[in-house]
Amino acid sequence: AVADNIRANLAEHIRIEEEGEYLAGVLERYPGWHPHVLHLQQEHRLLEGQLREIADRMTREIRTGRLTRECRRQFADWLAWYRDHQRRETDLVQEAFVLEVGQGE
């Protein structure tokens, strides 16, 4: 199902962000931003957990031949939450970059 494919890609995406330089670079330059970065990282676990629950529910419902409106709404809500998370994460990294560039001038 679509949710299972997203789960696989999400896990890899999060691993790269957390093990790579993406958010670590922000903390190196701005250690005071740790609460913001920590919140985003904690949200990774919540996003993964909720998506796992939704994917499992979708699988069960598809087996019965009926994907409920409620399940579709949960998935749509999850997608909106994920997009918002990505926007906030990108905004944080961009702000760090802009501040760094501004300090170099």
Image (cartoon, rainbow, N blue to C red):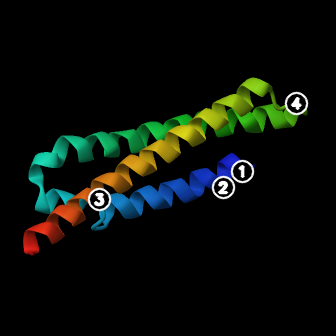
Q: Which residue is mark 3?
A: 93
Horizontal and vertical percent position of residue 35 = 19, 40
Earlier in the chain: of badge 2 and badge 3, it is 2
Q: Is residue 20 above or below residue 68?
A: below
The amino acid beneath tag 2 is Asn
Q: Is residue 45 above or below residue 17?
A: above
Q: Are marks 2 and 1 in contact (CB under 8 Å)?
A: yes
Q: Is residue 53 above or below residue 48?
A: above
Left or right: residue 3 versus residue 42 is right
Report the mark closest to the observer, 3 or 4: 3
Earlier in the chain: of badge 2 and badge 4, it is 2
The amino acid beneath tag 4 is Arg
Mark 1 nearby-residue class (10 Å; few <14, some 14–19, many ≥20)? few
Query: Which disc number belongs to residue 2?
Result: 1
The residue at the far top in this view is 70
Left or right: residue 43 versus residue 104 is right
Answer whether residue 51 is visible to the viewer in this image.
no
